[in-house]
């Protein structure tokens, strides 16, 4: 599990709690980790969380491509086609990155 890398826009700030980002399937392979724990302000956005994940794994450029096609859950809420800048993420939330997969 990767720990505390600085991010932007409410993620990586001092104080606040943490946001857990879980990578599944191809996202896990692209990131090279099962999950990231990001320090976060009390409230941030999904866009800021995804920017922080991409910045943390900048040495793994395939991750940005995979994240761009993932279905995303914040807690148990599917994000769908919502604008990531408008999706609130709070300290203590878990963001799930679910890449498309064949079958089922």
Image: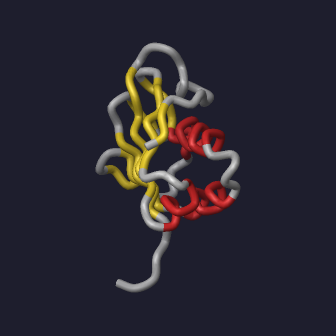
Whether residue 26 sits left or right of residue 55 in the image: it is left
- Is residue 26 shown to the viewer in this render? yes
State the quadrant of the C terminus.
bottom left
Quarter of the figure that contains the N terminus: top left
**Residue lying furthest bottom in this view?**
103
Name which residue lies at 44% across and 25% down.
43
x, y percentage for residue 20? 39, 40
Q: Is residue 56 left or right of residue 73?
A: right
- Label count reads 0
Q: Residue at x 56, y 31 (%)?
A: 5
Q: 56 above or below 97?
A: above
Snapshot colouring: secondary structure
- Res 79 seen here: no
Q: Position of residue 29 (x, y in %)?
A: 52, 63
Question: Quick one: which residue is furthest to the left in this view?
Answer: 76
Q: Point out the residue furthest to the top here.
A: 15
Look at 62% across and 28% down and name the residue there.
8
Image position, residue 12 (x, y; %): 54, 25
Above-or-below relation of 40 to 30: above
**80 or 5: which is nearer to us?**
5
- Residue 90 place in picture, x, y as percent: 39, 30
Q: Is residue 65 above or below residue 52?
A: below
């Amino acid at each position: 599990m990767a720990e505390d890398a600085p991010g932007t826009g409410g993620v990586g700030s001092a104080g606040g709690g943490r946001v857990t980002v879980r990578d599944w399937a191809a996202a896990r392979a692209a990131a090279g980790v099962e999950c990231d724990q990001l320090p976060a302000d009390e409230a941030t956005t999904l866009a800021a969380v995804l920017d922080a994940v991409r910045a943390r794994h900048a040495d793994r450029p395939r991750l940005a491509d995979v994240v761009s096609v993932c279905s995303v859950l914040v807690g148990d809420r599917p994000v769908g086609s919502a604008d990531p800048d408008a999706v609130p993420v709070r300290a203590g939330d878990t963001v799930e990155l679910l890449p498309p997969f064949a079958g089922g």
